[in-house]
Image (cartoon, rainbow, N blue to C red):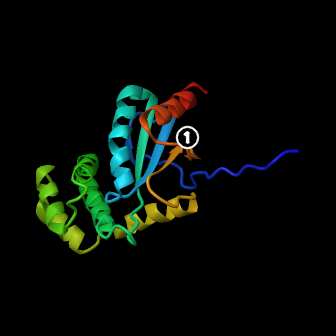
Amino acid sequence: MSTTQWAALLTMPVAESRDHIQGPADAPVTLVEYGDYECPYCGAAYPIVKEVQARMGDRLRFVFRNFPITTSHPHAERAAEAAEAAAAQGSFWEMHDALYENQKRLRDEDLHVYAEQVGLDVESFDQELAEHVHAARVREDFMSGVRSGVNGTPTFYVNGTRYDDSYDLDTLLGALEEAASN
């Protein structure tokens, strides 16, 4: 007797032109994270992802997409907009790291300080946040996550298929190593 198994697949393919990517395009493994800057589980996953990146080097391409869960994280959407405002100035990853490293401080005044720390044009940054210039981009990420089966954060995809196992270092690294060898 056979059973049908349904795997949640990434509906919006990774694109150099729109996604935030670290690692080479020809890496054998692509890890996509849908994350929320205020989510404590994403905060716990953050150093694990960094370690996985360090260990896998050029064999891993990492992609981050915004998935702010505003019902439980009141500052998450604003933080995601801040990351996108930083991206507009070429500093997405610096802001991404600052947000996760200061997860408990994500009010507007905090975001302003991080913008200064990463060397952004703060006047432009503040104006873009005030006018919600990047809200549509954050929504686009969020909706692509919904269509891909994301129902919490962090949600990871390995080579386009949702990864439903533990994201502790050994388990995640093992899954990525296995994907790299296939």
Residue drawn at the location 28% of the way across and 67% of the way down = 75
Residue at figure coordinates x 18%, y 61% from the top left = 111
Q: Quadrant location of residue 140?
A: bottom left
Q: Position of residue 108 (x, y in %)?
A: 18, 68
Residue at the spot of label 1: 159
Observer-nearest of 177 and 84: 177
Left/right placement of residue 154 relative to residue 109 reads right
Q: Is residue 50 left or right of residue 33?
A: left
Disc 1, SS: loop
Residue at the farthest right position: 1
Quick check: 140 above or below 17? below
In the image, what residue type sits under mark 1? Asn
- Residue 18 shows in this picture: no
Q: Position of residue 141 (x, y in %)?
A: 44, 60
Q: Position of residue 104 (x, y in %)?
A: 23, 59
Q: Which one is in front, 39 or 138?
A: 39
**Dividing the image into 4 quarters, which one contains the C terminus?**
top right
Left or right? Give the position of 45 relative to 78: right
Residue 110 position by quadrant: bottom left
92 or 171: nearer the eye? 171
Q: Residue at x 25, y 56 (%)?
A: 103
